Image: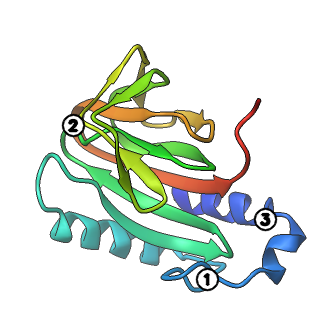
């Protein structure tokens, strides 16, 4: 229920100019997700999950380049960096260590992102249900030491990195 409220609040906070933009490929405009739809997305993510080193995503709502996604993990996933996108993370279940900053090891392009095998020099943060994290654009981040079924709701926001 809190994830639904978060999605509604985040969607309401999107600038009006975002509505004039065409939807991002693969993410049609959807401005509302009921609690039942969120639970169905979680059930689908669990059913589609391919193993501990993977992240399974389900888009809950989206407008323009702003997808709000449910993300499901059961183990450490490869670190990533989103080019030109900040990421707001709200933890809805479980816990982990989220490493942010530093440098991606063995960085490789992955669409509009970069992925790697580790992060050197990052800062670890213990996060758990109810926590919010804002990852600045172009910042490596890595979910490690996952406890239980780690579920979060994320919002990727295109923006320029701070100089």
Q: Residues within 10 Å of mark 1 (few under 14, many from 20)?
A: some
Residue 55 visible to the viewer = yes
Q: Is residue 52 left or right of residue 99?
A: left
What residue is at 53 percent from the left and 44 percent from the top? 89
- Foreground residue among 136 and 51: 136
What residue is at 62 percent from the left and 41 percent from the top? 137
Please, what secondary structure does the residue beneath circle 3 have?
helix
Please, what secondary structure does the residue beneath circle 1 have?
loop
Mark 1 highlights which residue? 30
Residue 2 visible to the viewer = no
Q: Is residue 109 left or right of residue 83?
A: left
What separation in Å lies between label 3 and label 1 (alpha carbons)?
A: 12 Å
Q: Position of residue 102 (x, y in %)?
A: 45, 21
- Foreground residue among 160 and 6: 160
What separation in Å lies between label 2 and label 3 (alpha carbons)?
A: 32 Å
User: If you read the primary sequence from the N terminus, does the residue marked by circle 2 or circle 3 appear first?
Assistant: 3
Question: Which one is closest to the eye, mark 1 or mark 2?
Answer: 2
Q: Which mark is residue 76?
A: 2
Q: Position of residue 90 (x, y in %)?
A: 52, 44
Q: Is residue 36 left or right of residue 10?
A: left
What residue is at 56 percent from the left and 34 percent from the top? 133
Tag 2 near tag 3, CB within 8 Å: no
User: If you read the primary sequence from the N terminus, does the residue marked by circle 1 or circle 2 appear first?
Assistant: 1
Mark 3 highlights which residue? 12
When asked about the image quadrant of residue 93, the answer is: top left
What separation in Å lies between label 1 and label 2 (alpha carbons)?
A: 30 Å
Asked if residue 121 is positioned above or below residue 12 in the image, the reply reads above
User: If you read the primary sequence from the N terminus, does the residue marked by circle 3 or circle 1 appear first?
Assistant: 3
């Amino acid at each position: 229920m809190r994830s639904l409220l978060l999605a509604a609040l985040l969607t309401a906070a999107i600038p009006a100019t975002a509505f004039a933009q065409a939807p991002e490929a693969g993410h049609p405009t959807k401005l509302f997700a009921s609690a039942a739809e969120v639970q169905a997305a979680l059930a689908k993510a669990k059913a589609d999950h391919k193993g501990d080193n993977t992240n399974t995503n389900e888009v809950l709502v989206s407008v323009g380049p702003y997808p709000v996604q449910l993300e499901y993990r059961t183990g450490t996933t490869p670190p990533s960096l989103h080019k030109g996108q900040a990421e707001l993370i709200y933890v809805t279940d479980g816990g982990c260590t989220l490493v942010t900053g530093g440098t991606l090891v063995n960085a490789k392009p992955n669409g509009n992102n970069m992925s790697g095998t580790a992060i050197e020099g990052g800062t670890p943060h213990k996060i758990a249900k109810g926590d919010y994290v804002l990852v600045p654009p172009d910042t490596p981040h890595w979910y490690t030491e996952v406890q239980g079924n780690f579920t979060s709701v994320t919002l990727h926001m295109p923006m320029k990195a701070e100089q």
